């Protein structure tokens, strides 16, 4: 019984993958400091959600919705809420999940021990990318409209929720033009 347990434990160990980095799972959206979520993002508070669509889909959505004609689409996109003008900047961010695969390492170690070359070195790690959209909002009066102390947060947050829902539910971005 003890040998069987050791064998099963050994097989589980060899087939296991050790997660090195796990991409966050965001069910709806998350308000967080940009730099805390991903290095390279601004220090401002950002509205982050998972993007299940293809690359540049959000860019095309914003370009079509605000009729920008490919001019400053990802920075300083103007929009109005209750007569006040705000600006939107967004970032498409990839955070990969990374795992360490033990079985290829053990097999290569056995090959090296028998005076052969390692053949599975490319399989030691596996990655799968998760994409996110991070949006920051600012105005002439406030540099960070999503900050906890911002007077605009209560107005801007529902707008961003609706924007996200519209983006995720729209397949043909020309439909957005008719909704505007």
Image (cartoon, grey):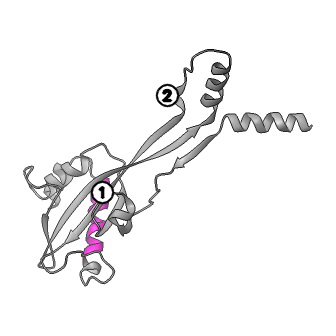
Relative horizontal placement of residue 21, taking residue 13 as reference (left or right): left
Q: Residue at x 11, y 79 (%)?
A: 83
Which label number is shown at residue 63?
A: none
Which label number is shown at residue 122?
A: 2
* Residue 99 occupies quadrant: top right
Magenta region: 156-169
Whole-percent x and y of residue 73? 14, 55
Residue at the spot of label 1 = 40
Whole-percent x and y of residue 146? 29, 74
Dot 2: what SS?
helix
* Precedes in sequence: disc 2 or disc 1: 1
Whole-percent x and y of residue 96? 43, 46
Q: Is residue 135 magenta?
A: no
Give the camera-side residue of 28 and 107.
107
Q: Residue at x 87, y 34 (%)?
A: 4
* Residue 40 occupies quadrant: bottom left
In the rendered image, the vertical position of residue 81 relative to residue 91, given as above or below = below
Q: Residue at x 49, y 28 (%)?
A: 122
Q: Are marks 2 and 1 in contact (CB under 8 Å)?
A: no
Q: Quadrant of the C terminus?
A: bottom left
Q: Main secondary structure of the magenta part?
A: helix
Q: Is residue 167 magenta?
A: yes
Q: Residue at x 65, y 29 (%)?
A: 106
Q: Whole-Å distance between the Cαs marked 2 and 1? A: 28 Å
Q: Quadrant of the N terminus?
A: top right
In the rendered image, the vertical position of residue 150 relative to residue 46, given as above or below = below
* Residue 55 occupies quadrant: top left
């Amino acid at each position: 019984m003890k040998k069987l347990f050791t064998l099963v434990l050994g097989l589980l160990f060899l087939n296991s993958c050790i997660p090195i980095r796990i991409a966050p799972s965001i069910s709806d959206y998350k308000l967080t400091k940009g730099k805390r979520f991903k290095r390279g993002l601004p220090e401002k508070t950002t509205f982050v959600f998972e993007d299940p669509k293809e690359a540049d889909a959000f860019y095309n959505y914003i370009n079509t919705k605000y009729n920008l004609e490919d001019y400053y689409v990802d920075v300083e996109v103007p929009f109005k809420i209750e007569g006040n003008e705000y600006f939107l900047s967004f970032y498409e961010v990839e955070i990969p999940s990374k795992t360490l695969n033990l079985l290829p390492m053990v097999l290569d170690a056995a090959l090296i021990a028998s005076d052969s070359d390692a053949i599975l070195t490319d399989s030691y790690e596996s990655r799968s990318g998760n994409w996110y959209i991070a949006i920051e909002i600012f105005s002439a009066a406030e540099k960070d409209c999503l900050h906890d102390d911002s007077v605009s947060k209560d107005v801007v947050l529902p707008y961003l929720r609706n924007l996200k829902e519209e983006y995720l539910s729209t397949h043909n971005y020309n439909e957005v033009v008719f909704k505007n």
